[in-house]
Image (spheres, rainbow, N blue to C red):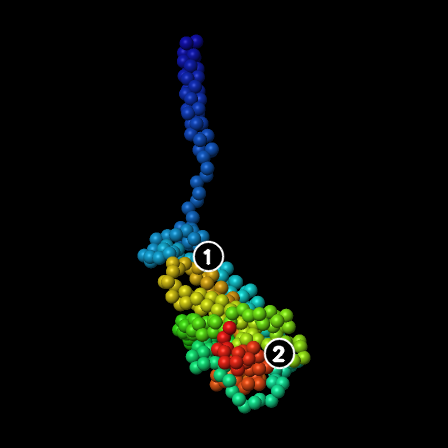
Amino acid sequence: MGAYSQPAGLAAWLMRLFAVLLALLAVPLASAADAPAAKPPGDKVADYWREVRQGVPGLSQVKGAETGVLINSEGQQWREQRNGPIKKYGATILLAMLGVIALFYLIKGQMKLSAPRTGRKMQRFSSFERFAHWGTAVTFLLMGLTGLGILFGRTVLGPLLGSEGLGGLLALGKLIHNYLGPVFLFFTILLIGAFLRDNVWQKCDAIWIFKAGGLFSKSGHVPSGRFNFGEKTWFWLGVTFLGLFVAGTGLILDFPALMGRTRDLMQNLVLLHAIGAVVLLTLSFGHIYMGTIGVEGALESMKTGEVDETWAKEHHELWYDDVKAGKSGHP
């Protein structure tokens, strides 16, 4: 009986020992089950460039406003805006203005003098005024043509010239555009200084606005000073505001070190520069038309500085009266 009970006691003791071991092992197993699963090792290179694209700065030897920023993720959005709405709507308003001018010319024709020329001349522009005007006009036309090439060249000229021909043409256009920018700004400031005093508000401007410049009247002429309200609008909106805006943004783009540059800032300036330039070009079409084929004798005044007395009386009667009365002809 005693010999039989020893193995039974040993078995019971082993069972208790096994139960204790199971209890001890249950604690770490439960903790391991509750702990989050370990992430499998990923592609470190892919993770790095993913962070770079998200704008997370890294280490760089380059010092500046965007030290460590290797990729600007806003670049794609900028490209879509430039090649999308700006090109689409820019081309639309430019072509629309050309269409309106062509239609106006077909219906109205050139504004002729209603009386014969007298042969007597009056000085309308001084040599300095013509220098400022032609300097602004020539640089503006070159800036406009090269700017249109940069914005629309790939769409319009690319199929005709091919990639190599277009690349060479745009490289030359970009050089002209960049180097002439400060020259255009200089002549714009010169032009503003030359004609500022003649573009102030006068009582006759209200009459000009009320009669829409005489476009719908039989005589076709409304008395005005040296410049009518339409010309004053071009001076303030086109030459002064848009001219300085386009030239100023272009100057910063030429010399980005003038201010703390970031790629976001430069991209936004490119868009604003393009929008301002397209609006300025659109308005300039009307000014160029009226100063060339739209009005008889208008181009002569800027070429020679003189106009016939008939022209002066019909287009700027109040200025004509002032000059004939011995006054300066300025407001």
Q: What residue is drawn where x is 33% and y is 58%?
A: 62
Residue 313 pos. (x, y %): 57, 82
Q: Secondary structure at mark 2?
A: loop
Q: Mark 2: give few (<14), some (14-19) or many (20+) Cα within 10 Å.
A: many
Q: What residue is drawn where x is 46% and y is 63%?
A: 269
Q: Is residue 93 left or right of residue 145?
A: right
Of label 1 and label 2, which has the lower sequence position?
Answer: 1
Q: On the image, numbered disc 2 is attached to which residue? A: 221
Give the camera-side residue of 113 and 85. Answer: 113
Residue 32 vertical position relative to residue 236 in the rendered view, above or below? above
User: Which residue ends up furthest to the bottom in the rendered image?
Assistant: 119
Q: Which amino acid lies under the numbered mark 1 shown in the image of this protein?
A: Ser
Q: Is residue 269 left or right of residue 208?
A: left
Q: Is residue 164 visible?
A: no
Q: Which amino acid lies under the numbered mark 2 shown in the image of this protein?
A: His
Q: Is residue 42 visible?
A: yes
Which label was assigned to residue 272? Answer: none
Residue 70 vertical position relative to residue 255 in the rendered view, above or below? above
Image quarter of residue 318: bottom right
Give the camera-side residue of 9 and 22. Answer: 22
Q: What residue is drawn where x is 61% and y is 84%?
A: 112
Image quarter of residue 164: bottom left
Q: On the image, numbered disc 1 is attached to which residue? A: 73
Residue 199 pos. (x, y %): 51, 71
Image quarter of residue 282: bottom right
